[in-house]
Amino acid sequence: MNILNIEIKARCEDPETIRSILEDQNADYKGTDHQIDTYFNVPEGRLKLRQGNIEKNLIFYRRPNSQTPEASNIDLMPAEHPEKLHALLDNALGTMVVVDKEREIYFIDNVKFHIDHVEKLGHFVEIEAIDEGGSIGEEKLRSQCQHYLELFDIPAEQLVAESYSDLLMNLDSD
């Protein structure tokens, strides 16, 4: 399944405030998921296997690192046997980095929100405006991200350009 996604990530000093705003907006809380994202070595883009209780997917995407909402075209496939798939991909490609996080998942219409606690990195909030069928369009997705950035009152200095995988690899290289 190919999906157009506009995403923004920010450090989050007060997850309770974000949680409260989402509740006030009648967001649909899907639950808290302990997720292990294993990133594999690929020549371009990113290939990760997400293993969680709510989400289990093999995900390939290309996205530039940016502190503004950026478009990604994502290929996503449900992972029916994630442990076997992990072993196969690790054997074939090698593991680049593993991201271990607790993720609260919320939705308002086509916009997905994550309140994450990432091991070794701390708390973050992500806003993902998603167009699965091609009917919403990139301009509307960007507008939705901007709306929630303003609603959450996230200052520019808290925006994060890099993926969790990059942030963790940068920690290891310091």
Image: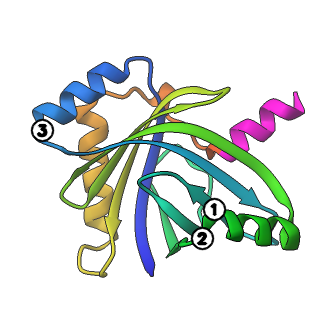
Q: Residue 49 carries which label?
A: 1
Image depth: mark 3 or mark 1 in front: 1
Structural crowding at the residue carrying mark 1, measured as other residues with C-alpha within 10 Å and reported as few (<14), some (14–19) or many (≥20): many
Circle nearer the N terminus (2, 1)? 1
Mark 3 sits on what residue?
Answer: 25
Secondary structure of the residue carrying tag 2 is: loop
Could you tell me which residue is drawn at 72 percent across and 57 percent down?
39
Mark 2 sits on what residue?
Answer: 81
Q: Say whether residue 14 is left or right of residue 83.
A: left
Rounded to the nearest whole Å, what is the CA distance between mark 3 and mark 1?
31 Å
Give residue 142's position: percent from left, percent from top.
33, 57
Secondary structure of the residue carrying tag 3 is: loop
Give residue 67's position: percent from left, percent from top.
52, 43
Image depth: mark 3 or mark 2 in front: 2
Say if 68 sits above or below 173 in the image.
Answer: below
Q: What amino acid is labelled 3 in the image? A: Gln
Queried whether the magenta region covers residue 171, the answer comes back as: yes
How would you classify the magenta stretch by its main secondary structure?
A: helix
Say if 115 sits above or below 50 in the image.
Answer: above
